[in-house]
Amino acid sequence: MTEQRSTHITWHEGHVRREDRERLLGQRGVTVWLTGLSGSGKSTVAVGAERELVSRGHLAYVLDGDNIRHGLNKNLGFSPEDRSENIRRIGEVAKLFTDAGVIVFTSFISPYRADRDAVRTLMKPGDFVEVHVAADVAVCEERDVKGLYRKARAGEIPEFTGVSAPYEAPEHPELVLDTARESVEESVERLVRYLEEKGYLSA
C-alpha cells in the first residue's frame, strides 16, 4: 500500500515556515509515540499529558488507536499487513501535526518494531519520541479494562497482541513508563518533565 501511484504531482511550498508556527505557539512540534500492550495505560497517560500541557498553555493533541479506526483507518483489520498500514498512515498524519508545531501524542499498540522505526525515519531528528508504556501481559490482563483479553482467551478475538499475536518491545526508547509500578499521575509527570527538559515546551 506504500507504492507511489500518483503521477504528475509537485510539492507546493507555503510562505509560512515551521519555525514561524512554533514561534507563534511557543513550543516545538513533536510526535510522542506511546507503544505498549492493550491495557498498559497508553491512552490514559496520553490524555493526561495532553490535559496537563493544555493547562499550561500549550497546543497538544492525542491520536488514539481506537478513535482512528472509527474513521481514517476503519477499512483496516488486524492482520499483520493491516496493522502495518494502520501505523504507516498514522505516522504520516503525526508528521503533519508535528510540522504544524503541535505536540502530538499517539496511542497505538504498534506491535512491530519495524513499523515504529519506519515512522521514525519519516521524521527529522528529534521529532519522534518513542515511549514504551511497559506493563506486561499479566498486569494488562488483570486490568482487562475493555474485556478484550477474556474474549481473546475464549477465541472470540483472533490475532490479539500479547495472546495470539506478537508484541516487539522497543529496544532503545527515549522513555520507559512502568505503569505497573507507578501511578497515572507519576507517569504523566515523568512524560511532561521529559518534554520540558528536552526543550519541546519552548520555541
Image (tube, grey):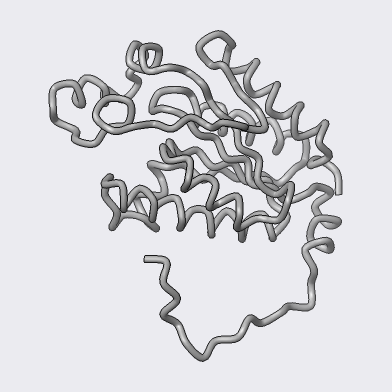
Depth check: give the residue in front, 9 or 145.
9
Above-or-below relation of 82 to 168: below
Residue furthest to the left in view is 155
Residue drawn at point x = 41 percent, y = 49 percent:
68
Tell me if 171 is positioned left or right of 146 in this view.
right
Label count reads 0
Quarter location, residue 98? bottom right
Residue 189, position as x, y percentages in the image: 70, 21
Horizontal and vertical percent position of residue 138? 36, 12
Vertical position of residue 54 compared to residue 144: above or below:
below
Counting from the top left corner in percent of width and height, residue 21 is at 79, 61
Image quadrant containing the N terminus: bottom left
User: Quarter of the image holding residue 129?
Assistant: top right
Q: Residue at x 50, y 12 (%)?
A: 180
- Seen at 80% across and 40% down, the residue is 201
Quarter location, residue 149: top left
Between residue 151 and residue 125, name the one nearer to us: 125
> Residue at 68% across / 27% down in the picture?
191
User: Eyeballing the image, is 69 above or below 99?
Assistant: above
Relative image position of residue 143 (x, y in whole percent)? 37, 14
Looking at this rendering, what residue extends furthest in the bottom direction? 8
Q: 109 and 48: which one is in front? A: 109
Is 161 on the left or on the right of 152, as rendered?
Answer: right
- Relative to 189, 166 lies left or right: left
